Image: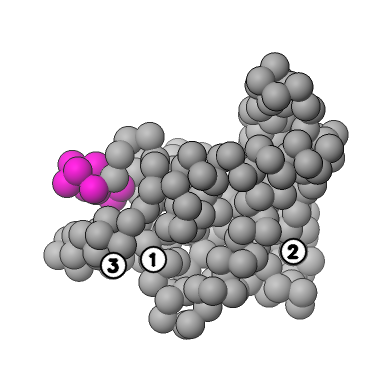
């Protein structure tokens, strides 16, 4: 997997011709706003994003002249992610978000979950981490750190939503985001296996192929141990 300049150029044509950024913003506008205390305790990982969201963020970063700075932060995060738990690469030392205006749906929805939904999501992530740990140990003879495996974002009680949003409403928004990405699949621009990757992966694949990035990441894990 790799995101080439040609792929982004073709994607941008599709974005423009089908008004996909406008559709994306329409979806975002249906997520209720809220107030938080700015502690940034939720900004401790690279969240997943749809391809259309990546394109929106990528253009924003390019327009703001932040690409080189962002890529350095993303490389540091991506290649060390299996070794130590880190803050989101877009989080500044002042606890502000470098891409707040175009942040993905996962960030916009944080705080809108019930405690039960939050705990269920953590259990899913923990299971994935344990499966990843078993894979790395079986394949490379090395375990992930306990910090990485068991890291948990605590349920946020400080966030105050403008109004509640139901689980069905959230699932509907996600379905609509998926439909936007489907247009890139149907146009043979985006391979199915690249759906809903983390933001760091999207950016890493603009500079490295999957094989290159994977090998460098494994080497960092082995050397980090």
Residue found 49% across the figure and 39% down from its top: 211
120 drawn magenta: no
Quick check: 89 left or right of 100? right
Residue at 64% from the left image edge and 65% from the top image edge: 73
Task: For the N terminus, give its image quadrant.
Answer: top left
Disc 3, disc 1: CB below 8 Å?
no
- Stretch of the chain drawn in magenta: 180-189
Q: Residue at x 79, y 27 (%)?
A: 143
Q: Earlier in the sequence, mark 2 or mark 3?
A: 3
* Mark 1 burial class by Cα count in 10 Å: few <14, some 14-19, many 20+: some
Return the disc, 3 or 1, that comes first in the chain's sequence.
3
Where does residue 159 sit, x and y in percent of width and height? Answer: 71, 60
Residue placed at 47% from the left, 52% from the top? 208
* C-alpha distance separating marks 1 and 2: 23 Å
Residue 115 bears which disc, if any?
none
Question: Circle 3 is placed at which residue position?
Answer: 22
In-image side of 154 versus 58 (left or right): right
Residue position marked by numbered label 2 in the rendering: 40
Tell me, yes or no, if residue 48 can be seen here: no
Residue 56, labelled with which disc?
A: 1
Can residue 157 be seen in the rendering of this structure?
Answer: yes
Give the structural element (helix, strand or loop) at label 3. helix
Which percent across, then down, holds residue 24?
34, 61
Image location of residue 87, percent across then percent down:
73, 58
Q: At numbered mark 1, what does the secondary structure look like: helix, strand or loop?
A: helix
Q: Indicate the quadrant where residue 215 lies.
A: top right
- Residue 185 lies in the magenta stretch: yes
Q: CA distance from mark 3 to mark 1?
A: 11 Å
């Amino acid at each position: 997997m790799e995101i080439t300049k040609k792929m982004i150029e073709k994607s941008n044509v599709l974005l423009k011709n089908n008004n996909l950024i406008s559709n994306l913003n329409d979806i975002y506008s249906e997520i209720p706003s809220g107030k938080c205390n700015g502690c940034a305790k939720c900004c401790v990982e690279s969240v997943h994003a749809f391809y259309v969201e990546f394109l929106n963020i990528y253009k924003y970063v390019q327009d703001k002249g932040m690409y080189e700075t962002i890529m350095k932060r993303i490389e540091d995060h991506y290649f060390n992610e299996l070794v130590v738990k880190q803050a989101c690469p877009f989080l500044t030392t002042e606890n502000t978000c470098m891409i707040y205006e175009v942040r993905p749906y996962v960030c916009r929805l944080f705080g809108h979950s019930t405690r039960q939904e939050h705990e269920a999501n953590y259990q899913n992530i923990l299971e994935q981490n344990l499966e990843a740990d078993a894979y790395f140990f079986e394949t490379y003879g090395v375990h992930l750190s306990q910090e990485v495996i068991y890291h948990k974002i605590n349920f946020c009680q400080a966030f105050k939503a403008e109004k509640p949003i139901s689980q069905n409403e959230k699932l509907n928004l996600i379905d609509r985001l998926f439909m936007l990405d489907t247009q890139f699949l149907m146009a043979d621009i985006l391979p199915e296996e690249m759906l809903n990757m983390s933001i760091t992966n999207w950016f890493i694949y603009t500079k490295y192929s999957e094989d290159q990035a994977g090998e460098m990441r494994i080497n960092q894990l082995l050397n980090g141990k």
